[in-house]
């Protein structure tokens, strides 16, 4: 888990201290996914200057997030830092200026799924894709919604499947939520109800949500 949590800008129990850069930004989960797939860190080398660092950040974030992870010898190297978290703390402004903006994500063609794919079967497919993604050691970016109600409407990063309780019918997952960077959040799947649920917090009453995978393939 240490490798994945480094990309989530976390340390120990997935606590984030990046600041306003990621808070409520729909584009931030995409950036984290891109760094997990296409970047590596070399803490023993000297850090780059701002211009060189900015160029390498753009080299990562301009790649298709659904692409296959690069082998280690082909990844973009970020010297001077152990992981994305430490780099984001030390070079926050450079990172913020070069990861792009999040608002275009609201206009993806795949957002039409929210209206036309509300059925339980589609959620079962999403659940299967979630398990398959985690089994490959990758991050799953999920868009949560209760449309047509707007009680929740943003993206999270699911990074771990917890042990399943026998006969409970409930599967539990740990997720990073940009709106709540202070601690992991829990997403659950009920095989009996064929639905996802998300934990209660100050900005969400808790309960059933629909989950739509983002960046798993082109136009998604």
Image: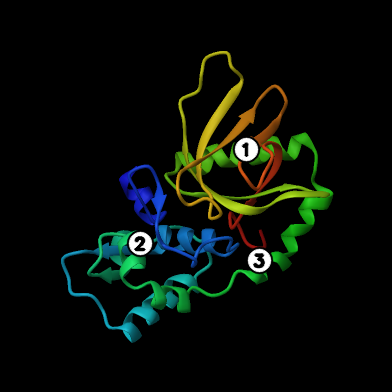
Q: Is 146 displayed left or right of 7 in the figure? A: right
Q: Residue at x 52, y 63 (%)?
A: 28
Q: Which residue is mark 3?
A: 105
Q: Is residue 48 visible?
A: yes
Q: Which residue is mark 1?
A: 200
**On screen, residue 60 above or below 156:** below
**On screen, residue 25 above or below 123:** below
Classify residue 218 by image quadrant.
bottom right
Classify residue 59 by image quadrant.
bottom left
In front of the other: 217 or 197:
197
Q: Considering only order in the chain, which callout, 1 or 3, is on the residue closer to the N terminus?
A: 3
Q: Residue at x 53, y 61 (%)?
A: 23
Residue at the left extreme, as displayed: 44
Q: CA distance from mark 3 to mark 2?
A: 22 Å
| Quarter that holds the N terminus | top left
| Quarter that holds the C terminus | bottom right
Q: Nearer the viewer, mark 3 or mark 1?
A: 1
Q: Position of residue 39 (x, y in %)?
A: 36, 64
Q: Considering only order in the chain, which callout, 2 or 1, is on the residue closer to the N terminus?
A: 2
Q: Position of residue 129 (x, y in %)?
A: 59, 41
Q: CA distance from mark 3 to mark 1?
A: 25 Å
Q: Nearer the viewer, mark 1 or mark 2?
A: 1
Q: Residue at x 65, y 48 (%)?
A: 203
* Disc assigned to residue 84: 2
Q: Position of residue 126 (x, y in %)?
A: 65, 41
């Amino acid at each position: 888990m240490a490798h994945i949590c480094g990309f989530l800008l976390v340390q120990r129990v997935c606590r984030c201290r990046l600041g306003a850069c990621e808070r409520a930004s729909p584009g931030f989960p995409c950036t984290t996914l891109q760094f997990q797939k296409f970047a590596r860190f070399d803490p023993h080398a000297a850090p780059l200057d701002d211009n060189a660092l900015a160029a390498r950040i753009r080299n990562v974030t301009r790649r298709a997030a659904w692409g296959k992870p690069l082998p280690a010898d082909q990844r973009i190297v970020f010297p001077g830092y152990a992981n994305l978290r430490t780099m984001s703390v030390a070079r926050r402004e450079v990172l913020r200026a070069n990861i792009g903006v999040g608002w275009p994500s609201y206009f993806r063609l795949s957002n039409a799924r929210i209206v036309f794919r509300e059925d339980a079967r589609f959620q079962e497919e999403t659940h299967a894709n979630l398990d398959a993604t985690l089994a490959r050691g990758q991050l799953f970016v999920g868009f949560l919604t209760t449309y047509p109600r707007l009680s929740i409407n943003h993206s999270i990063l699911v990074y771990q499947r917890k042990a399943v309780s026998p006969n409970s019918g409930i599967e539990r997952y740990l997720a990073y939520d940009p709106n709540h960077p202070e601690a992991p959040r829990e997403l659950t799947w009920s095989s009996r109800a064929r639905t996802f649920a998300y934990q209660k917090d100050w900005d969400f009453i808790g309960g059933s949500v629909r989950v739509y995978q983002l960046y798993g393939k082109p136009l998604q």
